[in-house]
């Protein structure tokens, strides 16, 4: 989409929002936007945008971790970035900007559809993802993640969710030759587990192909707690999370991804 076409589509969207504005209250303005998704979690938003969106697709949802805060989830190539939106009385804070109304907020998107990510790259906001679009496959994916969080067995999981597994976070990793422990930023996407020096690094130190992983499980052989290991033909990787619950979620998601790989392999 050209920048001119993008501006035109945004003008139409802004006009539609203005028509609705008279019927809105100050308290529910953000939630009345056509691209606000009620009760959508971070992982569900990632699955939704990665499976059915495109580069520049975005939506607004409530923050998983903070009350009275919203998150703008944006697809940038093969990942999803999240940016906080803070309602402050009658104004809205977004990044370094403060807007006096929802109208000003969405007009800013029309005129300056660029967001700076933590890595320093610019993300273009192109396509608001409407909440009115029904995506049955995505809600199957959401149930998969819910099943993992509630401790149900892998046999209970829905077998479709190709883009689920976009978990990211810091883990402590044991070195290969020198057995020291270092904190690294991990990103799980599709069938790959990548780790970086830190969250701001653009290039991964290494990419682990889960097609080659034979097992992932809790490990009690190390002195550290909350550890788990990934077994590959040439090396076993030892990782530690901050909590046992966090380690358990990493294990569950990776095991589920591995089960999908095996299922796809047997179908060929």
Image (cartoon, rainbow, N blue to C red):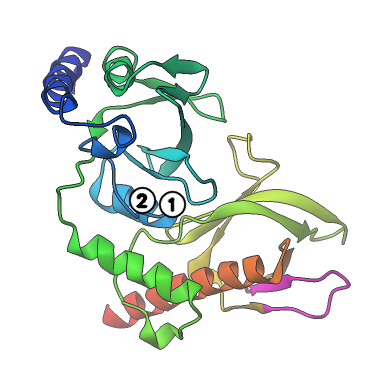
Question: Label 1, on which residue?
Answer: 42
Residue 36 locus on image (x, y percent): 28, 41
State the residue in front, 256 or 262. 256
State yes or no: discs 1 and 2 in contact (Cβ < 8 Å): yes
Q: Is residue 119 above or below residue 42?
A: above
Quadrant holding the N terminus: top left
Residue drawn where x is 40% and y is 79% of the image = 262
Where, by quadrant of the figure, is residue 119 drawn?
A: top right
Examine the structure image and report whether residue 227 is included in the region drawn in magenta.
yes
State the residue in front, 189 or 33. 33
Q: Is residue 263 above or below residue 68?
A: below
Q: Is residue 10 above or below residue 137?
A: above
Where, by quadrant of the figure, is residue 241 drawn?
A: bottom right
Question: In screen coordinates, is 261 left or right of 49?
Answer: right
Q: Please state the extent of the stretch shown in magenta in the rendering.
A: 218-233
Distance Cα–Cα, label 1 vs label 2: 5 Å
Where, by quadrant of the figure, is residue 222 drawn?
A: bottom right
Residue 45 numbered mark, or none:
2
* Residue 258 seen in render: no
State the residue in front, 228 or 261. 228
Q: Is residue 12 above or below residue 246?
A: above
Examine the structure image and report whether residue 214 is included in the region drawn in magenta.
no
Q: Mostly what secondary structure, the magenta segment?
A: loop
Question: In screen coordinates, is 255 left or right of 180?
Answer: left
Residue drawn where x is 50% and y is 69% of the image = 253
Residue 71 locus on image (x, y percent): 43, 39
Residue 50 locus on image (x, y percent): 33, 49
Residue drawn where x is 30% and y is 52% of the image = 48
């Amino acid at each position: 989409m050209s920048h001119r076409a993008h501006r035109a589509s945004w003008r139409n969207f802004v006009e539609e929002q203005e028509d609705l504005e008279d019927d809105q209250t100050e308290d529910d303005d953000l939630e009345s936007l056509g691209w606000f998704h009620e009760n959508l979690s971070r992982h569900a938003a990632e699955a939704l945008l990665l499976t059915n969106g495109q580069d520049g697709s975005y939506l607004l949802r409530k923050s998983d971790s903070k009350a009275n805060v919203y998150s703008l989830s944006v697809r940038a190539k093969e990942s999803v970035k999240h940016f906080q939106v803070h309602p402050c009385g009658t104004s809205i804070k977004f990044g370094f900007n403060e807007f006096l109304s929802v109208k000003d907020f969405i007009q800013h998107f029309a005129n300056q559809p660029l967001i700076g990510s933590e890595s320093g790259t610019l993300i273009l906001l192109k396509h608001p993802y409407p909440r009115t679009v029904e995506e049955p496959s995505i809600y199957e994916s959401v149930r998969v993640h819910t099943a993992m969080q509630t401790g149900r067995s892998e046999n209970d999981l829905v077998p479709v969710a190709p883009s689920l597994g976009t978990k990211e976070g810091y883990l402590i990793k044991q070195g290969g030759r020198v057995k020291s422990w270092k904190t690294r930023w991990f990103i799980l996407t599709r069938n790959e587990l990548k780790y970086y020096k830190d969250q701001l690094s653009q290039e991964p130190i290494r990419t682990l192909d889960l097609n080659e992983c034979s097992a992932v499980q809790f490990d009690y052989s190390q002195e550290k707690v909350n550890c788990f290991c990934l077994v590959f033909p040439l090396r076993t990787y030892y990782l530690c999370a901050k909590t046992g619950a966090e380690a358990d979620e990493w294990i569950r998601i990776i095991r589920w991804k591995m089960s999908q790989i095996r299922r796809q392999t047997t179908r060929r």
